[in-house]
Image (spheres, grey):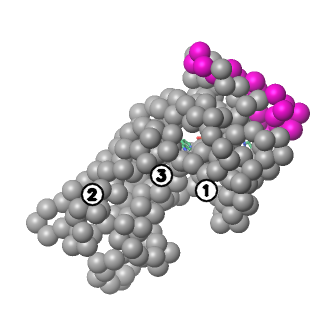
């Protein structure tokens, strides 16, 4: 039985995690924490904290976990470089599973994206398109950012230099090395991601569509149980699923 605390418990993902956690015989929910609640007062009672809250909340949550030697699962996205760096330093103290997406399908998409990019080579132009519900606050999505990181890594180019967020005006012809990124927002879309490989005379598109948040919640709960059996370090969902 893995004891977990959900941080961001009143949000869309928090409510889904509480519901899926209660239905999971391997999970005991110790507490649901949201703005105004005292995580420090209950963190000692848990095995792991699952954070799906707000980017500014992850760093203090991670510091509390490190102080109490508790495993941490981070689903929150939109962190600044400074926040990321502070949290990453704590990997020497506790196991941290940090994933921009906890669904099995998207982690398979990450794997397929790596493979397709290797196989297709430099003749194909790379673009990432994502769509999410109208209430999402950050853009592009953390998952789209991970896809772009995979593309840049396999192509051996600097993402900072080659990423093009949308296009507007006289931007000139597309270069072979740029990686396009396009964020669509609207309705109640849970999360769609497509990687486009556009070549001469053919186009390959790898698409994942999430229809329910349960897939993220169940993945994060699985990650929490897995994390509790690991030594301190930084892991992602591909590690949890045994994909790498
Ligand atoms: P949401 O806005 O519905 O919920 C966020 C919750 O966090 C709110 O209840 C808010 O009050 C709470 N919160 C804010 N600051 C807090 C703090 N300091 N301490 C505790 N709680 C705090 O958002 P959501 O749709 O549930 O998404 C939450 C986060 O998870 C976002 O960053 C989103 O991008 C990310 N997300 C990740 C995945 C994944 O698989 N990794 C999937 C879906 C969403």
Q: Is residue 56 visible?
A: no
Q: Are marks 3 and 1 in contact (CB under 8 Å)?
A: no
Question: Could you tell me which secondary element the residue under label 2 belongs to?
Answer: helix
Residue 8 screen position, x and y as percent? 70, 38
Cα distance in 3D space between marks 1 and 2: 27 Å
Q: Quadrant of residue 84?
A: bottom right
Please rate how many residues cluster around mark 2, counting C-alpha atoms within 10 Å: few if below 14, some from 14 to 19, many from 20.
some
Indicate left or right for 109 with 228 as reference.
left
In this view, the residue farthest toward the right is 41
Residues at marks 2 and 3 touching, judged by CB atoms closer than 8 Å: no
Quickly name the residue at label 3. 143
For this rendering, which residue is in front, 240 or 175? 240
Mark number displayed over residue 116: 2
State the image coordinates of residue 173 (x, y, percent, origin top left): 29, 82
| Ligand 1 within 8 Å, label 1 CB | yes
Rendered residue at 42%/67% (across/down)? 153
Residue at 66 percent across and 44 percent down: it is 231
Give the magenta range.
Answer: 24-45
Q: State which tag comes first along the sequence, 3 or 1.
A: 1
Residue marked by disc 1: 78
Where residue 168 sits, quadrant-wise, is bottom left
User: Depth check: 123 or 170 in front?
Assistant: 123
* Beta carbon of the mark 3 residue lies under 8 A of ligand 1: yes
Q: Nearer the viewer, residue 144 or 173?
A: 144
Q: Relative to 189, is 123 above or below?
A: below
| Element on which disc 3 rests | helix
Horizontal and vertical percent position of residue 46? 76, 29
Q: Quadrant of the N terminus?
A: top right
Q: Quadrant of ligand 1?
A: top right
């Amino acid at each position: 039985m893995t004891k977990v605390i959900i941080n961001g418990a009143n949000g869309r993902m928090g409510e889904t995690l509480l519901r899926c956690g209660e239905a999971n015989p391997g999970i005991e929910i110790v507490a649901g924490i949201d703005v105004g609640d005292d995580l420090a007062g209950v963190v000692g009672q848990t095995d792991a904290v699952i954070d799906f809250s707000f980017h500014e909340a992850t760093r203090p949550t991670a510091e509390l976990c490190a102080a109490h030697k508790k495993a941490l699962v981070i689903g929150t996205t939109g962190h600044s470089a400074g926040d990321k760096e502070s949290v990453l330093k704590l990997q020497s103290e506790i196991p941290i599973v940090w994933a921009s997406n906890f669904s099995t399908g998207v982690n398979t998409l990450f794997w397929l994206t790596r493979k397709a990019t290797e196989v297709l080579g430099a003749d194909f132009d790379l673009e990432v398109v994502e769509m999410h519900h109208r209430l999402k606050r950050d853009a592009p999505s953390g998952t789209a950012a991970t896809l772009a990181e995979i593309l840049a890594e396999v192509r051996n180019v600097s993402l900072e230099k080659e990423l093009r967020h949308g296009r507007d005006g006289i931007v000139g012809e597309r270069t072979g090395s740029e990686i396009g990124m396009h964020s669509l927002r609207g309705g109640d879309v849970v999360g769609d991601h497509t990687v486009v490989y556009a070549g001469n005379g053919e186009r390959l598109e790898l698409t994942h569509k999430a229809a329910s948040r349960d897939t993220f919640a169940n993945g994060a709960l699985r990650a929490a149980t897995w994390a509790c059996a690991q030594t301190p370090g930084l892991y992602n969902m591909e590690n949890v699923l045994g994909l790498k």
